[in-house]
Amino acid sequence: MMKNFAPQNGARWILPLLALAAAGARADTETWSVHGQATFVEQYHPAFRSPYAGPNSLDPGSRGNETFDATLFAGVRLWDGGEAYADPEIDQGFGLSDTTGLAGFSSGEAYKVGSSAPYFRLQRLFFRQTFDLGGDTEGVEADANQLAGTRTADHLIVTLGKYSVTDVFDTNTYAHDPKSDFLNWAVIDAGTFDYAADAWGYSYGITAELTQGAWTWRAGLFDLSRVPNSTQLQRGFGQYELVTEAEKTYKAWNRPGKIRLLAFLNRGRMGSYRDALDRAALTHAVPDTALVRRPASRAGASLNIEQALTDNLGAFLRAGMNDGSREAYEFTEINRSIAAGLSLKGAAWLRPDDTAGIAFVANALSSAARAYFAAGGIGVLIGDGRLPRYGTEDVIEAIYDVRLTDGVTAGTDYQFVANPAYNRDRGPVSILSFRLHMEF
């Protein structure tokens, strides 16, 4: 049954502040700012072939679900280079099958928790300090969580507080924002990047970003959840993630591009697939990583490339891998992944603010993970109760986003998923989406 959608409850909280910010004057160097956004996504899939299903299977019936969120991005300049931000948000809705059944889940707007009634959360609360290190002076444009101003080309940025790891790491011009580009989790982020996050995608942490010339180096320390895939974070870095990234800007065919290499290490109480299988063999039970958790580490790495091909066409590529011997801690069950695609502005058909795009993804499990799910194990997002015929989870995603007026876009999205949750016995499934996005 489709959930009732009641955006008016959240809208009346946020619209007065939207009007206040819209009326505020903008200066070259802002001392404060308020931006806002609201996004509604409806997803639907028709019935598909499914001889069996498990606790974390995508529902094989004809199903639809929606999500809605409205966010304020409030910032203030405290002193030269020092800024503070707070992002209160109202959320409502559910991902398909309560955000289970696909390793590369179909909507980046869907959290791992759902509610039929709107609820309030303070998703971000952080401080940012920028240190000028020399070079030419460059402008910083006004944007959400970014005050207009200037800085030198060489600079150091330190961020501290509650925010998302992917606010800083694994960004990509063409595939990173489910509010305006692609939706699939394994397209907008590296599917193998098991980044620290609560069930809403945020964590407490500190990052440093050093830019010198064409190079930027990033490093961060973040809290993991108290237990894998939890709504509660383990504060004080008792369980933590270390993440680093090197970025190089360059030109190819006289067009700008960027290449990023990321590595992460998670340290916390996590279960080994082999230990879970060994215990299950002794007890004649279904394997469960929750029963064999102990302090351990899990690492991974990914490559992220973006390249402008023309003034209106850009390409992207992500490829990654992680330690497949242990359970996914925060994100999803993907141990190998490659994603590539194109993003095209509509200037050729006299719609320069429209965006069309297509992406291709292949996700894979390690042999240890395959054995665990074949024996009936359940993970963060997947678990059909069996996995007799494994196959890579392959996704094709196509989008078209239309600019309706200033700050308002509407988009359609189609995803074809072969072997959902790596299961050749189920699917394929087609997922249709409609998105309405407003911002100022």
Image: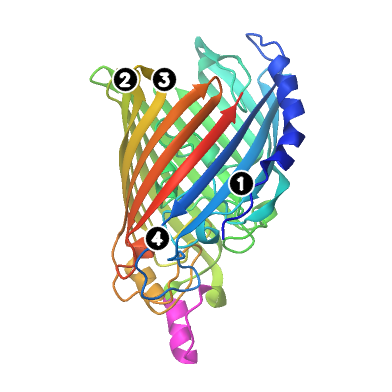
Name the quadrant of the C terminus. top right
Q: In this view, does 414 lie above or below 215?
A: below
Q: Residue at x 46, y 78 (%)?
A: 275
* Kind of element beneath mark 1: loop
Q: Can residue 139 be seen in this view?
A: yes
Residue 59 spot, x, y in % from top left: 46, 65
List the residue tagged with mark 3. Answer: 213
Say left or right for 42 vs 339: right
Whether residues under marks 2 and 1 lie with C-beta atoms below 8 angstroms apart, the answer is no
* Kind of element beneath mark 4: loop
* Mark in front: 2 vs 4: 2
Q: In which quarter of the image is residue 171?
A: top left
Mark 2 and mark 1: span between their CA atoms? 39 Å
Residue type pointed to by label 2 = Trp
Q: In this view, does 152 lie above or below 393?
A: above
Q: Residue at x 45, y 22 (%)?
A: 212
Residue 97 spot, x, y in % from top left: 52, 61
Labels 3 and 4: the sequence-earlier one: 3
Whether residues under marks 2 and 3 lie with C-beta atoms below 8 angstroms apart, the answer is no
List the residue tagged with mark 4. Answer: 323
Query: Magenta span covers which residues?
Result: 274-289
Residue type pointed to by label 4 = Asp
* Mark in front: 3 vs 4: 4
Residue 322 spot, x, y in % from top left: 39, 56
Q: Is residue 365 visible?
A: no
